[in-house]
Image (cartoon, coloured by chain):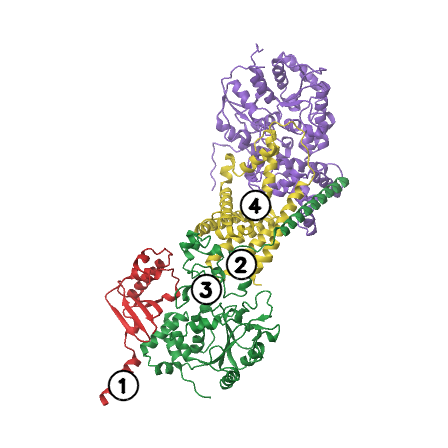
């Protein structure tokens, strides 16, 4: 006999929190033959086999410890979410085609040629269930950067036309219009004007010569436009000669996230060209994690030579300005915890910057347990937040993040990444969670000492 | 065929009491490495055993084995055994020589056809019959002729058992062991350079008492004496386990009687009874004298690398071949990388 | 011969302890099932001085006999009743065997059937002549 | 030539050639692939120092991962430490190395070696059980994993059996032991046991790339 606890009514319409295997949906782009898809995948797999990746792909011990670092595996116990398994096809291709013993692998048929079924199956593993957060790269006893390999494996998937539709659409829109959300230069200008009025702040636009080129992410322009004003306030307060440019404002890089190096380069070159055109000494990147990876660490390699200007994440810029006394802030009597964007902190190396800023704000800073470089990812990075079919899984792994945040019992939750903020907001709404993510930059902008230098 | 007396009768004639006989049987059991519970069976067997005829052939040898045996030929218990056998031919020990000696051999062979024992020391040269002859007969011919009517053959010493020193590389005389030539008769190998005298007599005693061949190991050696290694029965074994080793022949470890493994002791792979039977009427054995075992009772002991090289060292050639292997590795690596790059180019062109 | 001074200074090879343990178990067997045990010392490894050390450890008991047959033999009970030390020598006075017997009386001490018969015959001869 | 002579002589010799050639083959084959220059402005010095730092630091688990990886890590530690101690500190092994290196070092008492060897085998068995029972490991394991386990555990087992004398003679056991080492030497460069040398390359690479970014390594 079943007894029903009447205090909790059943809501049959609610989406289940329990893990549901994602529906099998192998998306395809274009109308290539299977053979052509395989060839395209091979082409872009083998392109990435250099000394660094070769040592990684040759070095794996199959110890399985990366599974314990991956939020997808930790939350689901699905062995397929073992990070190294996600790059199995990439690894297999390396061993069969390029590794030191490739001849014998082929001769003896020890590593199968990748098939179209393999590629389709791995679409889910390489996109829906990997945010390229790089936590697995830190646990690996061999020191293999698995996340980096996932990004490279995505090149083959993209060129084979085998990536999730949503991500492909966003990336395509980004390539065609210059923004993943279809923000045209006119629309950007519009929003900037609106923010300048709304917040009563001077925002330079399309200045011919400036020391600093500030850029924005479409997510901010669209969803968190106050960021535009905050950026302007801070740069104004620091006394920079700076500008936004309509010919180079979009910091996000969906070419990189989706795995298309060509589109990645187009997006990156727009920013580089704009900066060079105005003779900028520096590009200040917005609160966006992957933008930092794309320009700070991969930008010069897209350009093919060292960049003639510095690249800074806004948190780095603020930390630097505060340290040098270019800006000053009022103390904020609140307890704060900080969510590190993976690409800025763990993989970008700018972990300290946010802490310096928080220190200047004088808040009661509460580091999450195993925060900083070992932070759990928001679950939305690597383009995952765009893939609607992965929503269930994304929210499921977000539970880890919620626990981590709740344990701090801080008043405020801050971060410095609009993409993180977007996935936090989605899950916050979904779970009716108490914590609403705020922006580090906005907190600084709101608490600037007006009489600053 | 005249009836030979039994051992019991021989002993009785010498006025040995039953108690004395029991004592003799106890020491026999001890020699045969049989448990003391076997003593009554030994007593019964020995009493009724008959004196066998023994022909001893010496080929390419140094007479060390005979020396070893005669060291124990004083009237001891082992000596009694020799009283109990009829040594009808032994060209070192017998008084007769020349034709007379050969006549004695033929007489013994005829008289005891099918039941006599042939003991051989020394190896047989196959290279040229002239390398070693006795009374103008080549060793090979004499062996074949004598063995024909024998009950069994005992190869005494490492030369007869395994070729020994004459058979050592490069083996100029083409020396071979007895069991390479005698295939239709049982051959018992009693190797050692020389073998322990007690072991030689014990093998005869066993044949004498039980009328059967002892259980042999894969090298044809009686398991009773060659069943365990020197190392296993060595009184210095505890030092091996404790990791206490003499490093040189005159260091503190050597003086303290520590394990000689590092000085090249072959005890772990040498099967013989030295450690317990000991030498010179039970006085000691080489390791007790401070010298590592040479492994003289093992096949090809002469050719197993230096006596003073530790057992666990591998046998490597000079470093040149290893350097060659390294160079080959570099070459393969270069080829593999070039092939990998070509493979990359192939796919990037096609893709 | 090894003197007592050397016995004390015997380096420890560790072969005596396990043997004494075996003797202890043999005594247990003798007490429980009356089963005698003979340990042939020839088959055991001993370092220099260890045999003497063993002999000294077992000590001397109440009974000591000398047997004269094919050389002398000394049979004596050790300080531990039921544990006997047997040493056989050949006519050259060389030791040919050493045993520890754990028994009530070593078999060799009993008069043997054949010897009794032979002795009786000799006695009868003496009476008839 | 008996089995021991074969094992100590030609077998070991050929295995040494293969070990050396295979190792260099694999390293050169990786290092001579195309390299991608990194033009990004470094935040900190990468280079050899960074490589060495990570080669050392990845020997230890970062605190956040300790709870989840404690069990396999402990097993791996015991297995590796036991293995290294047995290989490098057992006196007959030291003499083996001295045979071609020309110098030696102090060893451990045999009983200590037996304990370490047994601990190492026990850990290896526990790791195999884990590999066979964990869904993750079952999925990602292939022939290489099981065969490498076999060839690396076999010499430990055959070595430990020698003093026990189970049914075989010492020289045969020793020959089998050496042959098992020969098998290990032959396989080592080609399968995942290559981590013996690849670990320096993979960790070193990560050290250079990530230290350069100033990121956590």
Q: Nearer the viewer, mark 4 or mark 2?
A: 2
User: How packed is label 2: few (under 14 Cα within 10 Å), some, or many (20 or more)?
Assistant: few
Q: CA distance from mark 1 to mark 4?
A: 90 Å
Question: What is chain B's hue in the picture?
Answer: green
Residue A318 spot, x, y in % from top left:
59, 19
For numbered disc 4, what is the local secondary structure? helix
Mark 2, residue position: B306
User: How packed is label 3: few (under 14 Cα within 10 Å), some, or many (20 or more)?
Assistant: some
In the rendered image, residues at marks 3 and 1 fall on the same chain = no
Question: What is chain A's hue in the picture?
Answer: purple
Query: In this orientation, which residue lies closer to the viewer: A358 or C48?
Result: C48
Residue at point 61% right, 25% down? A418
Q: Nearer the viewer, mark 2 or mark 1?
A: 2
First in sequence, mark 3 or 2: give its number.
Answer: 3
Mark 3, residue position: B228
Question: What is chain C's hue in the picture?
Answer: red
Q: Is residue A451 left or right of residue B246?
A: right
Q: Is residue A93 left or right of residue D7?
A: right
Q: CA distance from mark 3 to mark 1?
A: 48 Å
Q: Is residue B157 above or below residue B112?
A: above
Residue C46 spot, x, y in % from top left:
38, 61
Tell me whether the residue at label 3 lies in contact with that at label 2, contact meaning CB atoms closer than 8 angstroms: no
- Please report, as a chain letter, where disc 1 is located: C
Q: Nearer the viewer, mark 3 or mark 2?
A: 2
- Chain identifier for the yellow-coloured part of the image: D
Q: Quadrant of residue B255?
A: bottom left
For numbered disc 1, what is the local secondary structure? helix
Q: CA distance from mark 3 to mark 2?
A: 23 Å
Mark 4, residue position: D137
């Amino acid at each position: 006999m079943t007894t029903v606890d009447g205090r909790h009514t059943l809501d049959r319409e609610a989406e289940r929190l329990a893990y549901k295997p994602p529906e099998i949906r192998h998306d395809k782009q274009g109308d290539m033959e299977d053979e052509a898809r395989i060839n395209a995948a091979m082409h872009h797999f083998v392109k990435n086999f250099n000394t660094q990746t070769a040592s990684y792909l040759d070095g794996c011990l199959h110890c399985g410890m990366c599974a314990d670092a991956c939020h997808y595996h930790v939350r689901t116990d699905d062995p397929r979410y073992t990070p190294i398994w996600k790059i199995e096809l990439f690894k297999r291709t390396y061993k069969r085609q390029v590794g030191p013993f490739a001849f014998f692998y082929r001769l003896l048929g020890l590593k199968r040629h990748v098939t179209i079924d393999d590629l389709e199956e791995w679409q889910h593993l390489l996109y829906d269930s990997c945010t390229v957060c790089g936590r697995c790269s830190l646990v690996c006893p061999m020191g293999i950067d698995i996340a980096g390999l996932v990004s490279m494996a995505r090149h083959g998937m993209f060129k084979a036309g085998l990536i999730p539709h949503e991500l492909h659409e966003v990336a395509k829109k980004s390539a065609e219009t210059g923004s993943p959300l279809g923000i045209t230069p006119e629309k950007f200008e519009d929003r900037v004007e609106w923010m300048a009025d709304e917040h009563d702040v001077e925002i330079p636009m399309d200045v011919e010569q400036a020391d600093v080129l500030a850029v924005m992410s479409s997510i901010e322009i669209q969803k968190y436009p106050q960021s535009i004003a905050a950026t302007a306030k801070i740069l104004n307060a620091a006394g920079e000669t700076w500008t936004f440019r309509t010919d180079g404002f979009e910091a996000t890089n969906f070419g990189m996230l989706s795995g298309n190096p060509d589109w990645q380069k187009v997006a990156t070159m727009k920013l580089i060209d704009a900066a060079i055109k105005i003779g900028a000494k520096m590009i200040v990147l917005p609160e966006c994690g992957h933008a930092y990876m794309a320009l700070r660490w991969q930008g010069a390699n897209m350009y093919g030579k060292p960049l003639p200007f510095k690249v800074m994440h806004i948190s780095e810029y603020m930390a630097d300005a505060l340290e040098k006394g270019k800006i000053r802030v009022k103390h904020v009597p609140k307890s704060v915890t900080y969510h590190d964007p993976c690409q800025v902190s763990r993989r970008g190396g700018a972990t300290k910057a946010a802490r310096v800023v928080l220190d200047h704000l004088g808040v009661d800073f509460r580091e999450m347990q195993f925060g900083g470089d070992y932070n759990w990812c928001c679950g939305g990075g690597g383009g995952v937040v765009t893939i609607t079919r992965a929503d269930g899984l994304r929210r499921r792994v977000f539970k880890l993040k919620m626990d981590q945040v709740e344990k701090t019992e801080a008043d405020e939750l801050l971060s410095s990444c609009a993409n993180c903020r977007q996935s936090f907001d989605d899950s916050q709404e979904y779970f009716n969670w108490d914590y609403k993510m705020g922006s580090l930059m906005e907190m600084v902008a709101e608490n600037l000492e007006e009489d600053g230098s | 065929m005249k009836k030979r007396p039994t051992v019991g009768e021989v002993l009785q004639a010498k006025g040995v009491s039953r108690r004395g006989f029991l004592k003799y049987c106890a020491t026999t059991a001890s020699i045969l490495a049989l448990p003391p519970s076997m003593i009554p069976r030994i007593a019964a067997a020995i009493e009724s055993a008959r004196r066998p005829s023994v022909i001893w052939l010496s080929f390419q040898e140094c007479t060390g084995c005979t020396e070893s045996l005669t060291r124990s030929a004083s009237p001891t218990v082992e000596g009694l055994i020799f009283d109990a056998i009829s040594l009808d031919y032994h060209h070192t020990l017998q008084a007769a020589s020349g034709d007379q000696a050969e006549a004695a051999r033929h007489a013994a062979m005829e008289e005891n056809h099918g039941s006599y024992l042939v003991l051989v020391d020394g190896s047989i040269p196959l290279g040229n019959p002239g390398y070693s002859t006795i009374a103008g007969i080549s060793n090979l011919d004499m062996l074949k002729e004598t063995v024909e009517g024998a009950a069994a053959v005992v190869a005494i010493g490492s030369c007869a058992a395994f070729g020994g020193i004459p058979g050592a590389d490069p083996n100029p005389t083409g020396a071979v062991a007895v069991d390479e030539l005698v295939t239709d008769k049982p051959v018992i190998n009693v190797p050692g350079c020389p073998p322990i005298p007690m072991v030689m007599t014990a093998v005869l005693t066993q044949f004498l008492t039980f009328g059967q061949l002892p259980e042999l190991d894969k090298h044809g050696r009686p398991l009773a004496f060659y069943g365990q290694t020197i190392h296993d029965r060595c009184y210095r074994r505890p030092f091996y386990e404790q990791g206490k080793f003499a490093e040189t022949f005159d260091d503190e470890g050597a003086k303290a009687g520590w394990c000689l493994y590092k000085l090249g002791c072959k005890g772990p792979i040498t099967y013989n009874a030295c450690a317990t039977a000991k030498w010179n009427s039970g006085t000691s054995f080489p390791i007790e004298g401070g010298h590592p075992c040479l492994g003289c009772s093992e096949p090809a002991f002469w050719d197993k690398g230096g006596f003073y090289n530790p057992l666990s060292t591998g046998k490597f050639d000079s470093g040149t071949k290893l350097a060659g292997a390294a160079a080959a590795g570099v070459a393969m690596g270069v080829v593999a990388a070039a092939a990998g790059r070509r493979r990359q180019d192939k796919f990037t062109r096609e893709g | 011969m090894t003197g007592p001074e050397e016995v004390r200074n015997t380096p420890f090879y560790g072969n005596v302890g396990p043997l004494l343990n075996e003797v202890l178990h043999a005594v247990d067997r003798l007490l429980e099932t009356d089963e005698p045990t003979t340990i042939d010392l020839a088959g055991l490894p001993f370092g220099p001085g260890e045999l003497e050390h063993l002999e000294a450890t077992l000590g001397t008991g109440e009974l000591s006999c000398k047997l004269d047959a094919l050389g002398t033999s000394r049979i004596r009970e050790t300080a531990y009743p039921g544990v006997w030390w047997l040493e056989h020598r050949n006519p050259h006075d060389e030791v040919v065997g050493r045993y520890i017997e754990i028994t009530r009386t070593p078999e060799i001490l009993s008069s043997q059937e054949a010897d009794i018969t032979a002795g009786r015959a000799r006695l009868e001869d003496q009476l008839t002549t | 030539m008996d089995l021991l002579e074969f094992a100590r002589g030609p077998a070991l010799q050929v295995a040494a050639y293969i070990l050396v050639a295979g190792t260099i083959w694999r390293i050169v084959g990786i290092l001579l692939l195309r390299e991608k220059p990194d033009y990004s402005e470094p935040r900190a010095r990468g280079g050899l120092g960074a490589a060495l730092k990570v080669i050392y630091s990845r020997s230890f688990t970062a605190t956040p991962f300790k709870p989840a990886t404690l069990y396999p890590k402990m097993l791996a530690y015991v297995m590796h430490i036991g293995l290294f101690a047995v290989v490098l500190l057992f006196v007959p092994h030291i003499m083996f190395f001295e045979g071609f290196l020309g110098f030696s070092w102090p060893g451990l008492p045999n009983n200590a070696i037996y304990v370490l060897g047994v601990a190492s085998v026990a850990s290896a068995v526990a790791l195999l059980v884990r590999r066979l029972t964990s869904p993750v490991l079952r999925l990602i394991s292939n022939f290489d994993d099981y065969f490498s386990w076999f060839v690396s555990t076999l010499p430990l087992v055959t070595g430990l059996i020698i003093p026990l004398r189970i049914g075989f003679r010492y020289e045969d056991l020793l020959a089998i032991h050496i042959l098992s080492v020969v098998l290990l030497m032959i396989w080592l460069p080609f399968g995942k046991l290559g981590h013996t040398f690849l670990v320096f390359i993979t960790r070193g690479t990560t050290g250079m790339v990530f230290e350069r970014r100033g990121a956590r390594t």
